[in-house]
Image (cartoon, rainbow, N blue to C red):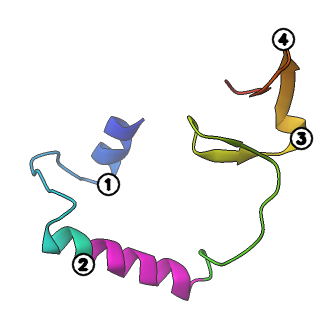
Amino acid sequence: TFKDLSKKLNLPNTDFIRTTEKRHKLSVQHLWNELVKNDDIYLSNYSGWYSVSDEGFYSDDEIEEIDGKKISISS
């Protein structure tokens, strides 16, 4: 999926960048500010099951119990 997206967006994989580099920090700050400006990032309350391995929240209808453990249906 990412390879296809890179081709569609004409994003060559020819550069290595560390997250500690100034150009990376500036790019991330710019992206973050754009997301905030467009109300795509906002403070809110979340409830539900959190999966550490998926790094995401799941609602009750996305969870099932197997052998006493709650797991996401997509796992």
Q: Is residue 45 above or below residue 61?
A: below
The alpha-carbon separation of the residues under discs 3 and 1 comes to: 36 Å
Q: Secondary structure at mark 2?
A: helix
Residue 66 lies within the magenta run:
no
Q: Amino acid at mark 4?
A: Asp
Q: Amino acid at mark 3?
A: Asp
Which one is closest to the eye, mark 4 or mark 1? 4
Question: Label 1 is placed on what type of residue?
Answer: Leu
Q: Nearer the viewer, mark 3 or mark 1?
A: 3
At mark 1, the secondary structure is loop
Q: SS of the residue at dot 3?
A: helix
Residues at discs 2 and 3 in contact (Cβ within 8 Å): no
What residue does disc 2 label? 26
Q: Amino acid at mark 2?
A: Leu
| Residue closer to the observer: 48 or 37 | 48
Q: Report crowding for label 1: few under 14, some 14 to 19, many 20 or more residues within 10 A (C-alpha).
A: few
- Earlier-in-chain disc, 4 versus 3: 3
Q: How far apart in space, not on screen, are marks 2 and 1 (Cα)?
A: 21 Å
Could you say which is closer to the camera, residue 46 or residue 41? 46
Could you tell me what secondary structure mostly forms the magenta stretch?
A: helix
Marker disc for residue 67: 4
- Identify the magenta region: 26-38
Tag nearer the camera, 2 or 4: 4
